[in-house]
Image (cartoon, helix red, strand yellow):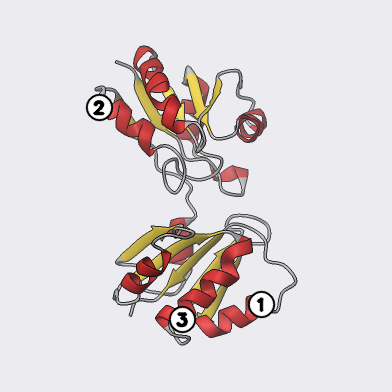
């Protein structure tokens, strides 16, 4: 049986990649990735041959998983990457990992870049225990999830896109109260990295007064 290695890649600064990750990307017979162009640029930066890329993303994972897991079983070693951060964490990958495990294929996950941990560490909020929600559902079940989490007494962590961050903060204000402490991190590991801390009301006012909010966002909220 082959081996699948999950390889975290930089979320901003390209220097954040580990030496071990680079070794795997050089040796893997096939690299499964969200966007071959994005991963191709990373490989080019480190002078790694990129002809072994196969596209595996949100829109094809349901019908490509069996085909790719069969191919992984026949290869010595394959790698799975996302566009940024750790594969399968709010990104495609879970279905492929599960299929490989079910077929007896060895699966290994390397430690490395993720937006989740830096945002919690820099938030100033308790990080000994936390609940990672990732992206909230856009429609069905969204209000119920917020109602349930409003009562949790541990730190909460959300991922959000820049064009939906104001909506999320208004919902947090409604369900959690305006005085709950919060930290909004954006552009982690990039030139314009920023951490905006305060009450939900203060952070919401800060962002509403901006012409535009850019970058992927991690929202860390104090427990009840």
**Coordinates of residue 127 in the picture (x, y in percent):** 35, 68
Quadrant position of residue 158: bottom left
Count residues near mark 1 (Cα–Cα under 10 Å), then give few for <14, some for 14-19, many for 20+: few
Q: Which residue is mark 2?
A: 102
Counting labels gives 3
Q: Given contact means CB atoms under 8 Å apart, are the residues at marks 1 and 2 in contact?
A: no
Tell me: residue 196, above or below residue 44.
below
Mark positioned earlier in the residue sequence (2 or 3): 2
Residue 212 placement, left or right of 127: right
Tell me: residue 10, above or below residue 160.
above
**Coordinates of residue 176 in the picture (x, y in percent):** 41, 80
Q: Residue at x 52, y 36 (%)?
A: 59
Look at the numbered disc 3 and give the secondary structure of its residue: helix
Report whether residue 47 is seen: yes
Q: Which residue is mark 1?
A: 208
Mark positioned earlier in the residue sequence (1 or 3): 3
Residue 164 placement, left or right of 118: right
Question: Residue 174, which numbered label?
Answer: 3
- Nearest to the observer: residue 50 or residue 219: 219
Tell me: residue 72, above or below residue 156.
above
Query: Farthest front residue?
Result: 140
Q: Residue at x 48, y 86 (%)?
A: 178
**Coordinates of residue 100 in the picture (x, y in percent):** 31, 26
Compute the Cα span from label 1 to label 3. 16 Å
Q: Given contact means CB atoms under 8 Å apart, are the residues at marks 1 and 3 in contact?
A: no
Query: Farthest bottom residue?
Result: 179
Compute the Cα span from label 2 to label 3. 43 Å
Compute the Cα span from label 1 to label 2. 48 Å
């Amino acid at each position: 049986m082959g081996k699948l290695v999950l390889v975290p890649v930089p979320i901003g600064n390209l220097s954040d990649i580990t030496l071990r990750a680079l070794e795997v990307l050089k040796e893997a017979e096939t690299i499964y990735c969200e966007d071959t162009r994005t991963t191709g640029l990373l490989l080019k930066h480190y002078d790694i041959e990129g002809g072994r890329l196969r596209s595996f993303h949100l829109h094809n994972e349901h019908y490509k998983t069996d085909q790719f897991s069969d191919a992984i079983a026949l290869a010595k070693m394959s790698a799975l990457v996302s566009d940024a951060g750790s594969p399968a964490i709010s990104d495609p990958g879970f279905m492929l990992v599960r299929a490989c495990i079910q077929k007896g294929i060895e699966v290994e996950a390397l430690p490395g870049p993720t937006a989740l941990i830096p945002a919690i560490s820099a938030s100033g909020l308790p990080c000994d225990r936390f609940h990672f929600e990732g992206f909230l559902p856009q429609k069905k079940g969204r209000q119920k999830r917020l109602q349930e989490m409003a009562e949790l007494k541990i730190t909460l962590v959300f991922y959000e896109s820049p064009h939906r961050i104001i909506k999320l903060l208004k919902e947090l204000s409604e369900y959690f109260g305006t005085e709950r402490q919060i930290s909004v991190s954006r552009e982690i590991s990039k030139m314009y990295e920023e951490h905006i801390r305060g009450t939900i009301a203060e952070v919401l006012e800060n962002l509403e007064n901006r012409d535009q909010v850019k970058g992927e966002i991690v929202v860390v909220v104090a427990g009840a």
